[in-house]
């Protein structure tokens, strides 16, 4: 049986949905959600749409919702008139939904990772993991917490920052610091209200160097904690209470002054050795490798030995890579050759008049769009460009959209409304 209808007045009147009560009522009927779950999902859905606006992800190519958020989104979409009104009023755009988005599993996984990282980055403690993680992932979180507790109990040596904790420094707090270079672990104790900058500077001078590690300024040391299956740098201006640390939590530290060497192995077995700091994004290394080989970066794909793809915004530390680890490089010859050959695109307006442009597959469409707008004597923002019925944007390239020679792009005047 469906549980009793919730008191819909508990939802804020300033909700992002113009009239959220019918939406909540539909979710209550369709999914048998109680009042507490309705509140949580509505909050998660609001955060999702706020990220859509931040990333300008109008065509569902950057972010992906969780299952429960997607369910509420579907119910909102069914009320077409109000959905269009809500999204246009708040964002200036109808926020598109791709019903086939789950068919491309790797792309969906990348969108999910981007969404979770953005949720934590933008909403911090208001990010409700229960609304975004799968049951399996939630169990894994619990397992990690259990391991941390066991590790805390087994660690005998405790380096204390204070001989006794005063009222200003807060309650005694313990974290386990793991040095990446040698997997050396130490437990340190400090006051929960002391800034992490003070704590980590003290650790660098009194513990890290004392144990025979590489010398260097405390600013050379990078401290990371695991958040939502990825490592994030610790905000040194905040304290343990503000960062919501768990006592016994593990912190990773490495000396960013010490680079690691990675082996790039291509399809012929040839190896190229490049040095990189653990916190540096791979984009720098990928560009250096492509330049050394005289090929376009778009024609290369980079993988870990286990087959996981490496993206430009990843870092060696995000994969916990060590000195002399191997990266496999795949060169797509057809892409390398075809990307250098310009293609012709046909821009067709509402009067069926066509204008032809040549462009490289790797060039942004902004060049074409801006030139077309100048030719027509209008602002580029007043035009909408469509390919196959779906809107395309100036930051995209023909390569992104799989455009071929003589493909047609439809041009329409931007209109407000649904």
Image (cartoon, rainbow, N blue to C red):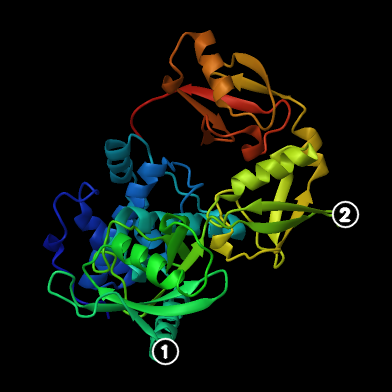
Check the picture and name the quadrant holding the N terminus: bottom left
Task: For the C terminus, give its image quadrant.
Answer: top left
| Image point (18%, 73%), residue name | 170
Above-or-below relation of 364 to 308: above
* Mark 1 nearby-residue class (10 Å; few <14, some 14–19, many ≥20): few
Res 139 seen here: yes
The residue at which mark 1 appears reads as 150
The foreground one among 121 and 290 is 290
Q: Is residue 10 left or right of residue 212?
A: left
Asked which quadrant contains residue 119, the reply is bottom left
Q: N-terminal of the two: label 1 or label 2? A: 1
Which residue lies at the image location 21% right of the left edge and 46% below the top edge? 18
Q: Secondary structure under badge 1?
A: helix
The reply, left or right, for residue 124 in relation to residue 367 is: left
Q: Furthest-right residue in view? A: 268
- For label 2, the residue is 268
Q: In the rendering, at what x and y percent does residue 396 appear?
A: 56, 34
Q: Is residue 128 above or below residue 355?
A: below
């Amino acid at each position: 049986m469906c549980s009793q209808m919730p008191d819909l007045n508990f939802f804020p009147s300033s909700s992002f949905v113009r009239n959220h009560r019918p939406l909540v009522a539909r979710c209550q009927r369709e999914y048998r959600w109680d009042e507490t779950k309705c509140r949580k999902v509505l909050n998660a859905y609001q955060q999702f749409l706020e990220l859509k606006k931040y990333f300008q992800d109008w065509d569902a190519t950057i972010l992906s919702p969780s299952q429960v958020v997607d369910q509420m989104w579907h119910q909102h979409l069914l009320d077409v008139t109000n959905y269009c009104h809500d999204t246009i009023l708040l964002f200036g755009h109808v926020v598109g939904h791709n019903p086939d988005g789950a068919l491309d599993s790797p792309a969906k996984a990348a969108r999910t990772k981007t969404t979770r990282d953005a949720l934590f980055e933008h909403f911090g403690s208001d990010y409700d993991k229960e609304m975004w993680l799968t049951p399996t992932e939630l169990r894994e979180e619990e397992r990690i917490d259990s391991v941390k507790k066991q590790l805390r109990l087994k660690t005998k040596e405790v380096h204390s920052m204070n001989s006794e904790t005063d009222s200003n420094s807060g309650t005694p707090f313990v974290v386990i610091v793991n040095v990446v270079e040698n997997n050396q672990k130490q437990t340190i104790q400090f006051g929960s209200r002391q800034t992490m900058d003070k704590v980590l500077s003290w650790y660098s001078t009194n513990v890290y160097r004392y144990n025979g590690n590489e010398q260097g300024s405390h600013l050379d040391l990078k401290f990371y904690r695991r958040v939502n299956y990825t490592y994030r740098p610790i905000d040194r201006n905040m304290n343990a209470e503000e960062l919501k640390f768990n006592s016994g939590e593990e912190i990773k530290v490495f000396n960013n002054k010490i680079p690691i060497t990675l082996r790039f192995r291509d399809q012929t077995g040839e190896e190229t050795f490049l040095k990189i700091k653990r916190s540096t994004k791979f984009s720098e290394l990928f560009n250096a490798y492509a330049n050394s080989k005289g090929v376009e970066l778009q024609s290369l794909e980079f993988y870990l030995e286990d087959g996981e793809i490496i993206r430009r915004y990843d870092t060696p530390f995000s994969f916990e890579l060590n000195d002399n680890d191997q990266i496999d490089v795949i060169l797509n010859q057809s892409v390398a050759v075809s990307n250098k050959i310009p293609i012709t695109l046909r821009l067709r307006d509402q009067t069926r008049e066509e204008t032809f442009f040549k462009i490289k597959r790797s060039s942004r469409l902004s060049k074409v769009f801006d030139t077309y707008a100048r030719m027509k004597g209008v602002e580029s923002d007043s035009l909408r460009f469509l390919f196959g019925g779906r809107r395309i944007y100036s930051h995209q390239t023909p390569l992104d959209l799989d455009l071929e020679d003589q493909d047609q792009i439809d041009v329409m005047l931007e209109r407000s409304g649904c």
